[in-house]
Amino acid sequence: MRQFPLEMHTLAPGRVVEWRLRSTAAAQDADRGDPSGRRASFNQDKHFTVAEESRAADDPVASWIAVTFEVEGPLDESALSRALLAFVARHEVLRCEFRRLAGELACAPLAADELALETAEVGAFDTSESLRGFLVERFRRSIDTLSWPLFTMGAVLREDSATVYLAFDHIVCDGMSMPIVVHEVETEYEALCRGESSGLPATAPSYLDFAEEQRRRYLSIGADDERLNYWKSFIERNGEFFPRFPLDLGVRPDRMYPIVNEASPLLDATEAEVFEKSCLAVGGKPFMGLLASVAVCLREAGGPGVYRGFMPVSERGRDAWTNSVGWFVNTMPIEFDASPGRDFTQVMTQVRAGFGEMIRHIDVPFVRAWELLAPEEFAARSWPYPVNFFSYIDMRKCRGSERHDEWRPTSHVWSARANGACSWFQRDADGLHMNSIYVDTAAARRTMGDFQGALRQTVRDIALTGGFRRPIALTPPRLPVRPRVQA
């Protein structure tokens, strides 16, 4: 399973059917305004606030996270409908409506037994191009942070197979939720087709409980709380709250740009295995070797010797959240020395130490630290400038990964505009892959093309030689321009 632009997906044409969620509750009961209800997480509150302010300024933001997967054989539409409804009922956050109550963002979950799915025939598509175009436009139009429901579900039906798709607003899920979607819907569907129980629980531990615990622990802290000391020390050395992306993207302050959304392989399966062994040989993990490679490539292209960036870290490891859908992501700063003259082993030692220090302070929510330590920037609707960002997921460790060859799941992210660059890295059975979204400027296309080429060469050199190439180039080689998918 890997992440790439939906426009790059090879989807066979077919007949499209959608399942639309509705409440069966009486109208007077559906208007929930109970101020004693559930409260949103810090991530959700900030996300919703940005959507509100953007709408008020007639400058709406838009984004979505989507997943597709395959079902072999003629689709049993009734079984899939029941599998989708069971999935929604299992995860409370998917049943939530969000409202402002006395300044706070409240979650009003609908009862699972008050939900129903309505089948809608969309139409037939004769070509892959027209089908992809429909899905892109459908996700853009249907995913709205301020409107319920916060996701859409459907399938492309053919005589001997089907492609199922679900697209979500970020407020109800994260990237690690996508493998959970695939596993649960496929497992439930297959069991229903056999006339058996899936064995999945009727309800999963709720993200709303996680949010409640998080707010209880951190809503009352102030800027002088000692739990913010890690952030403060990072800010002191960095000079500001956000770590800047160190290369030229050709952007102007306070301006958002259309995006380029592209993906490419870095290592094939065999190379990725050898790369992992090279990392383990020097006491590190594959993501550490990749992060070390990113730092060296940025430094060689003109960035600083000390790497500083943001790194999203999953919070599912605590308690019982492993198989829950929600926004279980904390974004943390990480820094380490990748100065010239350090070899692979030395940089990996620095990465390992930097990561260990970061993990020791993982509990403080990013949004809360942002609000307390950079209040002026917190009031803005976006990060203030291009930010250095690194994300890595090993999809082979996700539940259901042993069936990914059959289900062929893919994930996709999209955003209408940006003012910087974000890169996501995924490891799966086919190798190591990279998906980047960045501003559509001439400078950014040159910078990101050169950076990606240098990174690809660096990780391959580590796989081949066990270390960085010698001599280390002062600047990465200029690569030919490759076709890019415009989102």
Image (tube, helix red, strand yellow):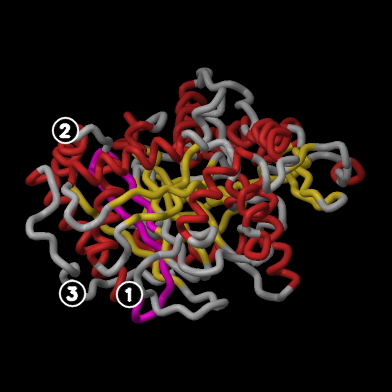
Q: Which residue lies furthest to the right in this view?
A: 28
Q: Position of residue 347 (x, y in %)?
A: 24, 46
Q: Residue at x 71, y 58 (%)?
A: 49
CA distance for labels 2 and 1: 35 Å
Residue 130 or residue 475, whichever sits in front: 475
Residue 125 or residue 470, whichever sits in front: 470
All told, the count of numbered labels is 3
Q: Where is residue 255 in the image (x, y as percent from the top left)?
A: 55, 78
On screen, 428 above or below 372?
A: above
- Mark in the foreground, 2 or 1: 2
Q: Residue at x 15, y 38 (%)?
A: 278
Q: Mark 2 points at which residue?
A: 281
Q: What stretch is highlighted in magenta?
A: 423-443
Secondary structure category for the residue under label 3: loop
Quadrant for residue 38, please give it: top right
- On the rendered image, what quadrant is the N terminus found in? top left
**Label 3 near label 1: C-beta < 8 Å?**
no
Secondary structure category for the residue under label 1: helix
Secondary structure category for the residue under label 2: helix
Name the N-terminal-most of marks 1 and 3. 1
Residue 263 or residue 304, whichever sits in front: 304
Q: Residue at x 19, y 49 (%)?
A: 267
Q: Position of residue 96 (x, y in %)?
A: 72, 42
CA distance for labels 1 and 3: 11 Å
Say what amino acid the circle numbered 1 marks. Arg
Residue 289 in sight in this render: yes
On screen, 405 above or below 130?
A: above
Q: Name the residue under label 1.
A: 445
CA distance for labels 3 and 2: 34 Å
Q: Mark 3 points at which residue?
A: 480
